[in-house]
Amino acid sequence: MINYITEIAEVTALPLSEIKSMTSYSVVGGVIANVNNYNKILLYSSNKILLKVKDNELNIDGKDLTIKQMTKNDITIMGQISSIYYSYEVK
């Protein structure tokens, strides 16, 4: 079975290395968010977490937000997640 990242690279014609370095996130039941390939935490409070991701920022809004697990590149956030969105830098 082909890995989904390899399939994305084939469909988009983007290099596999570029796809692997892109930020991705998943939300489970509105209470767990897993973010892959973040750079650093810019803001951390119980109702907002702001992450630096490549040239952008990833906003996670909610209630009772906590960081449950963190590695150099990946982070797991728990709480009542109400929204996740990117803030793009205007150039």
Image (cartoon, rainbow, N blue to C red):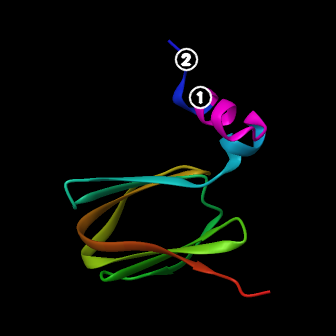
Give amino acid for label 1.
Glu
Classify residue 58 as left or right of residue 21: left
Where residue 79 appears, as percent x and y from the top left, is 23, 67
Q: Secondary structure at mark 2?
A: loop
Give the alpha-carbon distance from disc 1 to disc 2, as whole Å. 7 Å
For the image, the number of numbered tags is 2
Q: Secondary structure at mark 1?
A: helix
Q: Residue at x 54, y 23 (%)?
A: 3
Which callout, 1 or 2, points at the residue further toward the start of the chain?
2
Mark 1 — residue?
A: 7
Mark 2 — residue?
A: 2
Classify residue 84 as left or right of residue 20: left
Where residue 5 appears, as percent x and y from the top left, is 59, 33
- Foreground pick, 70 / 90: 90
> In the image as oriented, which residue stretches furthest toward the top?
1
Q: Quadrant of residue 40?
A: bottom right
Residue extent of the magenta highlight:
6-16
Give amino acid for label 2.
Ile
Mark 1 in CB contact with mark 2 (< 8 angstroms) = yes
Q: Is residue 62 above or below residue 67?
A: below
Q: Is residue 10 above or below residue 32?
A: above
User: Is disc 1 surrounded by few (<14), some (14 to 19) or many (20+) residues within 10 Å?
Assistant: few
Where residue 51 appears, as percent x and y from the top left, is 55, 71
Q: Residue at x 45, y 73 (%)?
A: 85
Where residue 62 appears, as percent x and y from the top left, is 27, 78
